[in-house]
Amino acid sequence: MEDNSSCSSMAALSQPSFLQRTLERLSSAQCVRVNSDAAPVAVIALQRYLSEQPAGQQQHQPDSYSYDVTVTDGVWRAKCFLHTGLNHLVHTNTLRTGSDVSITQCSFVYNEKRLGHGYMCLEKIRCVAERSALLARIKDVSSLPMLVRHGMENSLVLRSDVPLQVSRKHYLSLWNNEDPEGDIWTSGCPPSDTVLDVSKITLLCNLESCFKNTWKPLPLLVKIIHKSRLRYYGKFGSRIEYPYQAYFEVADQSGTMSLVLWNELCPEFFQRLKVGTVLYIQNFSLKQSYSNRSHPQMDYSRMKTFNSVEICLNPRNPASVITVISPKSVLPQWGLPEVSYQFSTRSELEKLSNNSACDVIGLVTFVGRVERVRSKGNTGTEKYWTYRWIHAVDGTSDRPFILEVFSSSQPQVFSRICPMSYLVCTQMRVCRVEGSLPYLTSSCETEMFITGYHKGQPYVSDPRVKSFIQWTKTLKDNVVLQKTCVGGHYCYPRPPHTYTQSMVDSSAQAPLVAAADLKKELETLQYREHKRLAIQGQIMAVRYMKHPKTTEPPGPEEQEAPVVSPDAGPDNHPSTAEQTLAASETSEKISASRGKRRIQKRKATQSSLNHGSVSAKRRHKDMEEGPELEEDEDDSGSEETQDVEPQNQDSDVISWESSSWLKQQQEVSEHLSGGGLYEDSLSLRFTLDEKNVVLQRSNLQPGRWSPEQSPDPAPPGVCPGYYTVTILGINKQIAVDAAYFPVVSSDDPRAVGLPQDPHSNTLLSCLSAGFLCPIRGSAPPQPEEVLATAGELEDTHVVCILDLCHLGGEKVEVLINKVYRVTEVSLD
């Protein structure tokens, strides 16, 4: 066992330890089953890396990544390997840092190709609580000694920040592949003050001729003027230990050229090389430029750009020598150009052409939750991009910048963007979509800077930046704070007025899928993954749910999850119909006048939040055991069920049903339960006092636990109510519930960019427009008034645009974005 410090080791040895006892039992048995009443352990780290490919398996296997889990029992820490059969617990954020779990089965795995190396493997676990009670009692987790099996005390793998599977040398960020992760990424090395002999250097203009000849060029003296995000290109079978690449644009007095940092030089230098940094480079190589990569749009009109070759810095063959020069050592006679920016104001955005580049600065007023989307056209291992939506104002327009910001390999900045910050985004691209305001999306070369990160950046002296700072001095914080929001559902741009199904390119709009495919999409969605899909059919029922005034935190019995085994698979779970919550709103008996339009009021038997989630019983999937659904088939559809007490609080329900829905329900083979609205779907007002809480809720779950993770729940969002819409697939075999909560106020971040055309406030026009008229001035119509117009939905063929997002654990958000009549659909 590792002796981190004599004091902590002695304290640990004097206390009973579940982890220590379990490891001792594994000394005499390969596999250990633990009693179900064993004390839980807390998860303090989840670390991801590219899986080893077992011999004989195909290159593309289902589990591209492996996970190491560090747990503590309050006495020891232990880094364990998570059995690949439990990976789905990470994918759905069911297994998460800061939570308590019970280990019910584990084994010890030796590395057969290396002496003195082995690790515990978690084979079955039970998730006990989302917020750990154990961690609240530990003052300093890092001071606890690391538990290591006897005879393996000298294993460097077990001591250092590297994967347990020794063929991998580094960890990846938990939720994407672009962010630096782990101790290998250095940033604190000071620049060199060494006196350099720059009398013998090569200018960039001479490198193209060097490429055609065999002679070795002299050193380079260049300044970085653009920097790209990291690119990870790891794949199965590759022997490259650090498969990273990063592009830079560098310049000297003769022009600009691309420079590529390769492999292990990325962990060493990527975070040290910044825009404006001056480099002295020796032992570099040249290669023909990669034609398919993106390039920054540069405003260096008097400088020549050399695109035919690029500079390669490699760790070997040859081993490049990179010297970062201190700013105070840079001399004017070197003739290096100043970094140039192209700042545009919000008032100028309307004049910029589609896909043109610009830099922006603004005061943040809205920060959306971080979401993920699968990388398109990826032929290697599964990859996700992480992104968030942001609103920022600069005083030149009454409209904000709408920014779609993807991770730029700056995790500390990306996760800390909050309202009231000064945000600078470089190399943003203009996106113009018919029917929506123009917005900006980040490029591979985008960098972001917020308050606290501006010092020393070259743009601080730009006239546009100085003008913006002067404008912010005229603002009052309390006035701006009233207009700020964080998190919640936000998707932009709005779908176009006409839905066009292209026979050639299905990526332009939400792809039209069969109802059966929608079910598969819901079941395979991963944590914070967002998808936009379209289904066609008929709207058969609509219910309006009043938002509860309070939301009680789940009790211990609601937090417990069943034992999870790696042997349980996708086929070992109840059907979606069986997972439907019996406590959802019950239908009244159909009266003799069913064919007439009816508005029904009844009591809901379930809280309006988390109502009938698509994944409300998802934990039964891939699990061996679990609490049975409390369901009474005889109660379905009976009037007596209206006397059942609701789980949380009484809530009036106003509803409409199609005259044919009763008959159609008997023929539906599957009803995908859903239509719930979650707290995570609602944006929160931002306050400085609750800054950390609301930002944690809108950010992704961290891979490492820290005491700063607030144990307090975020305040509930404000929402007067929402509609649950039941959509029957066009073949009348599968139905799905989706939530719809329209924009009712101009204070809603989703109100920005909405079409200004008024509509009649019928239910169908509201579903089409996404808002109730008016969103400014007088009060919008009441739900009873809207539902009174639902009769036009009878036998109406529609196309529904759905936004799907997995919110973690059992929560899957299914929201209606827009509904089209068939007359608004065309084929391309």
Image (cartoon, grey):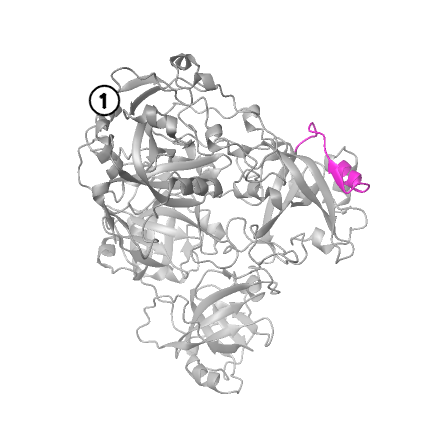
The answer to whether residue 380 is above or below residue 576 is: below
Residue marked by disc 1: 597
The stretch drawn in magenta includes residue 679: no
Residue 221 pos. (x, y %): 48, 76
Which image quarter is the C terminus in?
A: bottom left
User: What segment is highlighted magenta in the picture?
Assistant: 20-40
Looking at numbered disc 1 in the image, what kind of residue is underneath it?
Arg
- Residue 304 vs 22, above or below: the answer is below
Residue 692 in view in this figure? no
**Residue 23 is covered by the magenta coloring:** yes
Nearer to me, 107 or 503: 503
Secondary element at tag 1 = loop
- Residue 797 position, x and y percent, is 26, 37
Left or right of 710: which side holds 343? left
In terms of image quadrants, where is residue 97?
top right
Q: Is residue 325 above or below residue 710?
A: below
Res 127 quadrant in image: top right
Q: Is residue 626 visible?
A: yes
Q: Position of residue 783 (x, y in %)?
A: 26, 25
* Vertical position of residue 186 compared to residue 490: above or below: below
Residue 424, quarter of picture: bottom left
Q: Residue at the spot x=54%, y=34% of the render?
A: 573
